[in-house]
Image: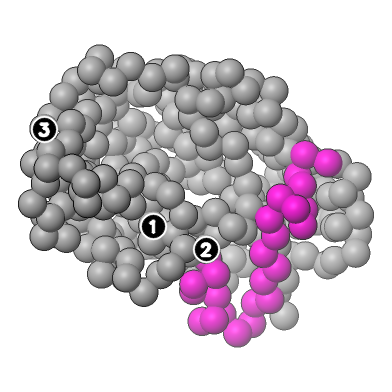
Amino acid sequence: MVKVLVTGGDGQLGHCLRAITERFENIQFLFTNKTELDITQKTNIDDFFTLNNFDWCINCAAYTAVDKAESEIESSKKINVTGVKNLAEACLKHDIKIIHISTDFVFDGTQNRAYKEDVLTNPLGVYGNTKLGGENELKKICSKHFIIRTSWLYSEFNQNFMKTMLRLAKDKEELNIVSDQIGSPTYARDLAEVIMLIINRDSSDYGLYHYSNEGVASWYDFAKAIFDLNSNTVKVIPVPTESYPTPSKRPHFSVLDKTKIKTTFNIEVPYWRDSLKYALSNLELVKI
């Protein structure tokens, strides 16, 4: 029996992993939240890993409040850098393979073609800087790692762009949505499937990978698709980023090149609108 620890198990990726675990009868999962396992507390992690005998760790725990991170720098560092460092040291000590989730925010968005894994990073804000810091700690400490950068994550669970748009559409006749930030929406369940494929194959193709759904969209395109597929009549108005200034700058272009993960694991990546359609159809079955 393969034993897998999932940190940040109450987040949307954690929930999507839970949703598919019943298919893997040969794998035993332990999902933890911050209360059950605080990754910023090194002693807690050491004790936890000593008491349990894990084969894999999936780190979904992260500080993801992009704008709040600008004023909560230490909190962001504590989770995104120190927490990852603690997990990396424990995984090295106990010979555990680790899959760590990172972000497109490690790039500055000035490139005009999809970002490959070897492109120079240049985060624009605290969130991106701390996520990159976590990547670097993991690379330095534990060789048996998979780092998966993803973008614009959404699902039926927790709060995200898709659910926010549907909530706003109940009270608004029109919405202004930014149209000059370009990326790729990623359905968290699709990412969960790839993670489980890596574990189920007991892969040792360690390293850095990019994963998002296929296709390119702006936030305006994403919102339009949500409403079109859900038969909402709300009017969506495209606006520039300058119309909605935020504490943290966003990359204007953060499309991720997925060639490496597709060829290494021989997978097909779903188109973003197809996955969005599935997520919307499944939304009424989910109460979280």
Q: Which residue is mark 2?
A: 15
Compared with residue 209, is residue 205 higher up or lower down, i.e. above or below?
Answer: below
Residue lying at 59% horizontally and 62% vertically, measured from the top left: 203
Quadrant position of residue 229: bottom left
Residue lying at 55% horizontally and 75% vertically, measured from the top left: 21
Between marks 3 and 2 in the image, the one whose residue lies nearer the viewer: 3
Between 271 and 249, which is closer to the camera in this rendering?
Answer: 249
| Colour basis | one colour
Q: Is residue 26 on the magenta stretch?
A: yes
Instruction: Rate crowding at label 2 as few (under 14), some (14 to 19) or many (20 or more) other CA atoms within 10 Å.
Output: many
Q: Position of residue 122 (x, y in %)?
A: 47, 18
What is the spatial separation of the Cα atoms under label 3 and label 1, in whole angstroms?
24 Å
CB contact under 8 Å: marks 2 and 1: yes
What is the spatial separation of the Cα atoms under label 2 and label 1, in whole angstroms?
9 Å
| Label 1: element kind | loop
Segment colored magenta: 17-41
Instruction: Rate crowding at label 3 as few (under 14), some (14 to 19) or many (20 or more) other CA atoms within 10 Å.
Output: some
Which amino acid does the dot numbered 3 rest on? Ile
What is the spatial separation of the Cα atoms under label 3 and label 2, in whole angstroms?
32 Å
